[in-house]
Amino acid sequence: EAKFDGQILVDDKLETLSNKFYQLAFAHSSYLINIRHVEKILGNEVYLDNGECLSISRTYQKEFRKIFTKSIAEKY
C-alpha cells in the first residue's frame, strides 16, 4: 500500500470532504484528521500513527470521539 505523509491542496471545502469521506473527521475548524491513522485519544489530544500529536477543539471533541469509537467497532 502506498503511503503518503504530508499535505494535499484541494478545491473542496473541508465540510464537503468530511461528507464525502467518512474516515475524515473534524478535530478543529481548520483541519480534518483521517481516523484510520489515530492510535489513541487522551483528553483533547489525538496521537497519530506517525507520532504526531494534534489537539481537538472543544467544539469537535464529542463528535470526533463518536466517529473514532464507531471506526473501532467496525474493525471488530
Image (cartoon, rainbow, N blue to C red):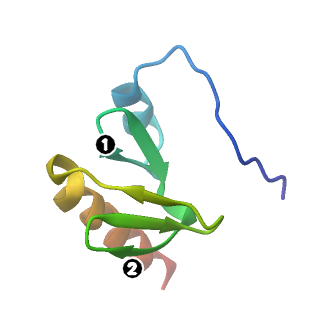
Horizontal side of 37 relative to 76 (left or right) equals: right
Task: Point out which mark residue 28 bears.
Answer: 1
Q: Nearer the viewer, residue 7 or 10?
A: 7
Q: Quadrant of residue 42?
A: bottom left
Q: Quick check: 9 above or below 23?
A: above
Task: Point out which mark residue 73 bears.
Answer: 2
Residue, far top? 11
Q: Dot 1 lies on which element?
A: strand
**Quarter of the image containing the N terminus?**
bottom right
Q: CA distance from mark 1 to mark 2?
A: 24 Å
Taking the spot 36% from the left edge, 32% from the top edge, the residue there is: 30
Q: Quick check: 35 above or below 43?
A: above
Q: Quadrant of residue 45?
A: bottom left
Horizontal side of 16 relative to 6 (left or right) equals: left
Q: Number of callouts in the render?
A: 2
Rendered location of residue 38, percent (x, y)? 50, 67
Disc 2 marks which amino acid?
Ala
Q: Residues within 10 Å of mark 2 (few under 14, many from 20)?
A: few
Disc 1 marks which amino acid?
His
Is label 1 in contact with label 2 (beta carbons under 8 Å)? Answer: no
Mark toward the start of the polypeptide (1 vs 2): 1
